[in-house]
Amino acid sequence: MGLNKKSVDDINAKGKRVLVRCDFNVPLKNGEITDETRIVAALPTINKLIKDGGKVILCSHLGKVKNGPNEGESLAPVAKRLSEKLGKEVKFISDYNVTGQETTDAVAAMNEGDVILLQNTRFRGKEETKNGEEFSKELADLADLYVCDAFGSSHRAHASVEGVTKFITAKGGENAVGYLMQKEIDFLGNAVENPVRPFVAILGGAKVADKLNVINNLLEKCDTLIIGGGMAFTFLKAKGYEIGNSLVDDEKLDYCKEMMEKAEKLGKKLLLPIDTTIADGFPNPIDAEIAIEVVDADKIPAGKEGLDIGTKTAELFADAVKSAKTVVWNGPMGVFENPILAKGTIAVAKALAETEATTIIGGGDSAAAVNQLGFADKMSHISTGGGASLEFLEGKELPGVVAADDK
Ligand code: AMP
């Protein structure tokens, strides 16, 4: 999919107020940022706009803000870290109203190349509802141009992602996408629509129900679809295997049968675990030491629970990766939070790190696993958006992309 959308290279930011929606939804522990990936990923667009002489107004959400605005979900720590990364002041507007008087005054006082960061957009509450018109307009009132670089939020039609663009257009402004958005869409889009073959897609994680459309869409696009993690057991049960107490979604058994038939009809390989790592039950706490055993996938004893792929499966999956030219991976192969049950996920991560193929990690847990294992720089692309990359892999159009002006 070629991205025929205006980018930051197609707009003239000189002297203009540019509102940039970033994804600064970073993990925090006691007010400290524990992973700055999303901040680093936003730098190319911000630096470009500074260099062009724009007045750069940044905004983002952070966390779920379930109980209303609070200092624990303030973007203040992001302003500080961003300032260090850019090597210049990032003025933080702490205004819980996001677009109130403090903000309008600060914007009015901006010079070319200045950067300010607004408060958490979810502090307004309306960000997530359909009645965000007022907030969308107030955001648009702050700026002449709008740039969306928040890939991780681009699957949501929120005020700061989509709503704002209508008001920018109405006053004759332009809406563009940033470099991060471009990069994400280039990698994910090329992998899905125009992959160098063989194209192997690997899916894992807990539930089949969460990934129904991804399975269906990828089956059509890839050459080999690998399914591991908790979701594999619904497939194994659909094949008639005993799966003990393993995670299962009985309502999706017919769906799994349908997908297996579809794979056969299309001549695609659908690889499922041939052995599995079992235990007496789910570890509690999740990182508890537990006794495990590896058994063939069709020999899971009643009462036991499959919590990771087995050794033969890890080899089978790694072999499929070896001969691939493009690999997309989303979701762990087992309960990787427990080191005893992380072997399958590690084996897949290692196989991806060792192949010459283009490797794309679809955010979320698989991205965390790759980062933790120190394989990040061995991957071609690690998506910054878990939910957004999944929707992309489903073949859905992302509101944040659609809303940008065509070239
Ligand atoms: P998801 O959010 O769907 O990508 O799922 C990630 C979660 O799936 C992780 O927290 C894993 O612990 C969990 N998971 C992976 N494999 C299994 C399994 N065999 N049984 C139960 N949970 C699993």
Image (tube, helix red, strand yellow):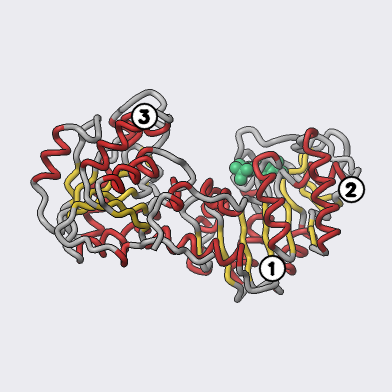
Ligand 1 positioned in quadrant: top right
Ligand 1 within 8 angstroms of badge 2 C-beta? no
Q: Looking at the image, is 248 positioned above or below residue 273?
A: above
Query: Closer to the observer: label 1 or label 2?
Result: 1
Q: Which mark is residue 237?
A: none
Circle 2 SS class: loop
Between the C-alphas of marks 2 and 3, the distance is: 50 Å
Residue 320 x, y percent position in the rendering: 74, 68
Query: Closer to the observer: label 3 or label 1?
Result: 3
Q: Contact, CB < 8 Å: mark 2 with mark 3?
A: no
Q: Looking at the image, is 177 positioned above or below residue 235?
A: below
Query: Within 10 Å of the Cα at label 1, are there few (<14), some (14-19), or many (20+) other Cα atoms?
Result: many
On the image, numbered disc 1 is attached to which residue?
321
**Which residue is at a point 77% across and 48% down the rendered structure image?**
277
Q: Amino acid at mark 2?
A: Asp
Sequence-first tag of 2 and 3? 3
Q: Would you say 184 lies left or right of 349 here? A: left
Between the C-alphas of marks 1 and 2, the distance is: 24 Å
Q: Would you say 186 lies left or right of 351 here? A: left
On the image, numbered disc 3 is attached to which residue?
126
The residue at the far bottom in this view is 356
